[in-house]
Every structure is written in C-alpha cells, then in structure tokens.
Image (cartoon, rainbow, N blue to C red):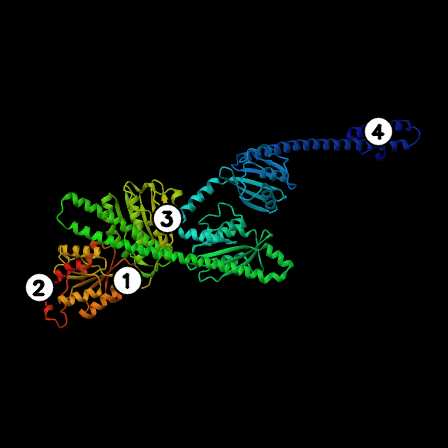
Amino acid sequence: MTAPFIDPADSLERQNRKLLKITSVLMRRVEQAMDDSGAAYAHFQRALMLEEEVQARTWDLEQTLGLLNQSNAELSRANRAAERARADLSNALEAVQEGFALFNADDVMVMCNSRFGMHMPDIRAQLAPGLTFQRYVQLVSQSAHLALPEGETAESWAEKRKQKHKENHVNFNVRITGDRWVQVSEHRTPDQGTAILQTDVTDMIRLERQEREKLLDDQARLIRATLEHINQGICIFDDQHRLVGWNRRLAALLNPPMHLLRVGTSFDRLLEHFGRDLTFAKGQSLRGVRDWVHQESSRQPLSLEVTRQGKTHLDVFGQEMPDKGFVISFTDVTGEREAIAALSAVNETLEQRVLDRTLALKDALEVAERANASKSRFVAAASHDLLQPLSAAKLFLSSLASMDLSEEPLVVTQRIESALNSVESILAALLDISKLDSGRASVELSTFPMNQVLAPLRDEFQPLARKKGLDLRVVGCDAVVKSDPSYLRRILQNLIANAIRYTGSGKVVVGARHRDDTLSVEVWDTGPGIPEDKRETIFKEFQRLETAGPSGEGVGLGLAIVERACALLNHPLRLHSQVGAGTGFMVSLPRSRGPVRPEAAHVPEAAGDKAGAHVIALVIENDKDVRWAMATLLETWGVSVFDVRDQAEALALLREVGVAPDILLVDYQLDRGENGLDAIDALRAEYGRLPAALITANRSQDLRKSCDTKGIGYLNKPIKPAELRQLLQALGPHPVPALRGDPRSERSGIGGKRQFDLAHSLRRRAMR
C-alpha cells in the first residue's frame, strides 16, 4: 500500500524518513476520526501494521548494510592479496636467470624482468610494458648488438622473426656481437598471449664446438661435408638408438632446444618432444615409428608424411644401416603440398625429386662406408708393419737380457723392454678399437664356467698388485655363463688393470653376484673415484683422469675398448662411483644351463733353464731383422736354428743338409703372396707331420680356426719371449724323423754333427 509513496531508487535512510512521516500522518487521522465511526479503529490497526512493516524493513536494511560493509572489507583484502601476488610474481621473475617478457592477446607487453634484452643495452630502456610486439621486433632488428647472418638485412630478419611469431611454439638462436648466442623460446599462452624466454647459451654452443672439434677426423669431415650439401634434415642414430650426427638443415626444420640436439640423446626422448606437434597421414602413427625403431629383425625402409603444427609438411624417410643403426631424413615439402592442391599434375615430378634425393643420400652413405673400410684396412696394414720391427727389437732385448751384462746396461735393457711393452699394448689397443669400430669384429658365443676366465686373471695381476702394495682379491665363481671368453677376458683384463692403475692404496676386489637369470661380474676398487662430470668422458678414446698418478701409465683406450666390446656382446655395462671412496664397474652376463665347452689344457712349464735343448728349429720369416733376432734368441736357449726367408729356400736348405727340423716356426705373411700355412703344408708333405707354430700379426678368428684344424700352434706378434719359450716347451723336444731315402739323416754320431755344422754354416752364409 505504501509502494506509490516510496521510490526504490531512494537511499535506505530517505525511505525510512518517508515511512516514519506516513506513519505519523496516519496516527493523526486515526485520532481525529476516533469519534466519527468504527472505521477509525480499522485505520488504527492498519497504522500498527505499517509500523511493524517499517520496523521489519528497517531491520532488513541494517542487515544489508552490514553485508555490504563485510563485502567491502573482503574486497579490500582481496585487492591487497592481488597486489602482494603481483609483487611476488615480479620478484620471482627478477630471480629468474633468463630474460622474460609477457605479451597479451593484442601483442602488447604486459610485463618483463630486468634481464629481458640484457644482451642489447642500446634498446634495453625501451623494453617496457605497453610496448607492441611489432615495435619490439623492429628495435631488436636495428640494434647494433645483433649479429645478422651473412647476406641478411635488418628488414628481412624482422620479417622472418614475425613469421616465427605466428607459430604456437618456437625455439631459435640469435647471434650477438662478441660471438655470443641467445636462445629465444616463444610459447603461446591459453588466452592467446605470448611468453618469451631469453637464455644465454654461449657456453653450451662453445662447448659443443669443442666436442665436435675433438671428434672430427677425415671420415667425419667427409660425412659432414656430404650431409651439409643435402637440402634435407638428416639425423643419424647408432644401434642403441642414440643420436650420433645431424646437419644444420635438421635444426632449421625442427627448431629443437639446445639441450636435446646433442650427441647421445635417445630417439625416444626426441620423439616424445616433437610428437606433440606432429600430425600423421592416414594409417601412420607415433606408435608405428617407435615400433620400427625398436624392431629387432632387419628394418624395411620407412616412409612417412607428417604435418608440423598444422603448417609445415615434411616427408620423413628412415633407412637401416649395416651396423643396425639408422638414418632419418626430413624433407620440407610444404611448397609442394600446397602446389599439389592446385596442380595435381606435378605429383609425379615431386615424387621423382624425393626419390633422387634419397638415392643421393644412399650414395653418400656408401661412400662413407667405403672410406671407413679403407681406414680400417690402413690401420691393420700399418699395425702389421709396426709390429715387425717391434717384434725384432723385443727378441734382441731378450737375447741381451740372457747375456752376462753388468748392472747398468741390464737396467737400461729392462727400461727399453718396458717401453717396448707399452708400445705393444698401445698397438694392440688400436687394433681392437679399429676392429670394433669397423664392424668386422666377430664373436663366438659359448658356455663356460666363470672361473675359466677369473682364475688366469688372478694369476696375471697378483704380481702387479703386490708390487704396488695393493690387496687384489678375485673371488671364484662356478656359475656357467654364455659369452665369448676371449672378449670377456679382454673386458675384465682392462677393468682390473684400470683399477690397479688408479688405486693408490687399499684393495681391488673382483667377484660375481647372481641376479635372476644373469650374473653380474664386478670390479671394485678403493681409488679416488670418478667425478660426475667425467663419467661419460672416461669411455672416450685417449681420455685419462688426472688421478692416474705420476707414472702416467696407459693412454686412455682401455675403457673405450670395454664399452665397445660390451656393446658387441650385448652385455650391459654399469658404473658406480663415489669421489674419495672408490669405483665399481659391473658387467651383466646371461647365465646358461647348457653343456660347458671343455677348457683348453694348461701347458706345464718344462723343468730346467734350456727350453729347447737338443732341438732344431726351422724359422721361416721374410723380415731379415725379425729372422735374425729370433735366431739369436733361440740360440741363447740352446736351440739350433735354420732360418730362411720363404718356403722354397727352406726346402732347398733341408734337402742340402739332409736333416729334418724338430719344430717349424713360420711367419704368416711371406713375400710374393705366399703364406705360412701353405709353407707348413708343403714341409709336412715332404717330411711328415712336423710340430709347427704360426707367428703372425693377424688376429682374425678365421686364422685361429685354420691353425686349430691343422694342429698348428698360434703366436701373435710382437713375439713375447716368455710365450715363445712356453711354445717350445709344449711342442718339443721330439725325435727327428728320418729324411726319406737319405741315410745321412741320422742325427747321432759324427755324421749328425757334421750335418748340423753344415746347416749352421749355410745359415750364417745366407744371413751375410
């Protein structure tokens, strides 16, 4: 009833005053009309009701005012909290080591920290909230601190920068004057704003340059030159799915972050990063690519078409290499795909171009493989040529050591022998590295007890450990494993030698732990430990820690061989080290329950000092120095020697003197394409099955098998006098078989003595 008299737009105080006035007027009217009629009572009741309504309305208004005051207080607190949050955000951005800026959806800068644009002090003062993105790009392009690429102008650079801004996520590097680099990471926010992060990556780029310079050799330079001239992004992975090479075109196509595009990054990690931005053609998927990479059998060529960020179309081609690694190429076909939408007639031409480029890549890889094979052949040939004079030198030194020398010459002789032993170990390591890298290394897996390898290693290294004052403990293990015993022995030999070399005091423990179906063979030492940042470096060639000690032993090839041999055998290799507490290397081998291959019989040492007493040895060696050195050494042991250069000279000499030798010591590589196996066969054909040994620098498994099949001993160059002496003890002495049809062949009595003197005279005359 009071609605026509009250304006809802009035304040609560004005409405209360109107209601009170209405009530007062009504009360007066009631009092005046009290005597007129009974209607006055009704008016009075109505006035009371109005008063009650006014009181209720007043209470409601008071409650509303209280809620309004409370809301205002909460709003003030929220505003203060927002201010604090904004201040905290500003402080957090200032604490970030990188430059940071945020642009809103209208490409206007909202905020930035003090490090944003710090590499360009000439424009730093203008980088502030309210700056448009267009103006920001213009300022950067015109900065005196921006090092533009060759042939690039500030305008063209700015245009390319604006094109990159259209992508949702982008990473690229900017070169600054003074050979400094900044990585710019630009990401779109959910509200279509843009966050920009500037990171100084100068140290990373310089370190990567240094690492690349260390690894470059002739082969790498050839491959790099080939890849850099291909208009495709190329990445190469090894058989462990690790990145080992790429070209600049790949970085331009995919814009990867610096921490991902590094040697050793796994394929799965790269696929996880780029897969979020890739759209595959029908019937193709990320899972299919991953399955292709992890396929154990031979991979068929893989061809894909993907779209990156909905804009860039890429043809992806994958090809397996002979060493089970693989190559993936990326071809930017965005222009072609856009042209196909309008001109489908050029489809065949585009396919032919892709095919031609793929064939060009295959040709380049074949060239690289041929270069690698040539390098391996060169290393093998050079090593053989070096082993010949080294072998002669060691034999001459052994002859000197057996003479009655005074103390000073004897010490010098021992030092020379030690130096030659070091050279020999380096050459052996280089041969192993060359064989493992070339892919020519073959393994012969067999089952054998672990003690077959551990026991000889204990006997081999105990003297060296005692000499250094170390406690070497080799814990025996009867578990049967499946591996190549030769390679496994070389792995453990290098690990034990490494542990002894780097341990100044304490002990070295070698043992095995059973782990389900595998056996973990472990080598632990109490040495100085390996720092975290050196644990990948130690497996590279010619890398040694500074803690090697003053002796300077080793050249840093042992662990490189260990890593390659473990990869060849598929034996996982693990490392655990604590600086100041020691290091442990663990090699996991598959256990076996199959039949055990019998262990080679141990050759006992013959009693006495003269290993070859009353023995005649025929030495066939085309190198004059090696032949003379071996003859001199054998004669110091009491062995009578016929030494000749080839098969024909050997047969002629034996027919002339009428005496058959007790032992044949024959070099494998002779002149005019002849080889020692054929020479031994020819001599045995005429004089019967003579005991024989092949002496060679060739370490192939096929040659060893041929010697085993023919019952011929095998001795590697450079010749170790101890091994040669043991070989004589194993093969001789034997009775000399009679020469067919020649009564002069008897070795007893005066006739035999004359024949021997004649042979000795003939040999000396031949040497002169």
**Answer yes or no: do the residues labelled 3 and 4 have beta carbons within 8 Å?**
no
Which residue does the numbered mark 2 point to in the structure image? 754
The kind of residue tagged 4 is Thr
Near-viewer residue (137 or 751): 751
Q: Which mark is residue 643?
A: none
Q: CA distance from mark 2 to mark 4?
A: 162 Å
Q: CA distance from mark 1 to mark 4?
A: 126 Å
In this view, 47 is above or below 466? above
Q: Earlier in the sequence, mark 3 or mark 4?
A: 4
Q: Quadrant of residue 370?
A: bottom left
Which residue does the numbered mark 4 point to in the structure image? 23
Q: Earlier in the sequence, mark 1 or mark 3?
A: 3
In this view, 108 is above or below 688? above
Q: CA distance from mark 2 to mark 1?
A: 38 Å
The kind of residue tagged 2 is Arg
Q: Which mark is residue 704?
A: 1
Q: Secondary structure at mark 1?
A: helix
Q: Quadrant of residue 444?
A: bottom left
The kind of residue tagged 3 is Phe
Crowding at dot 1, Cα within 10 Å, few <14 / some 14-19 / many 20+, comes out as: some
Number of marks in the rendered image? 4
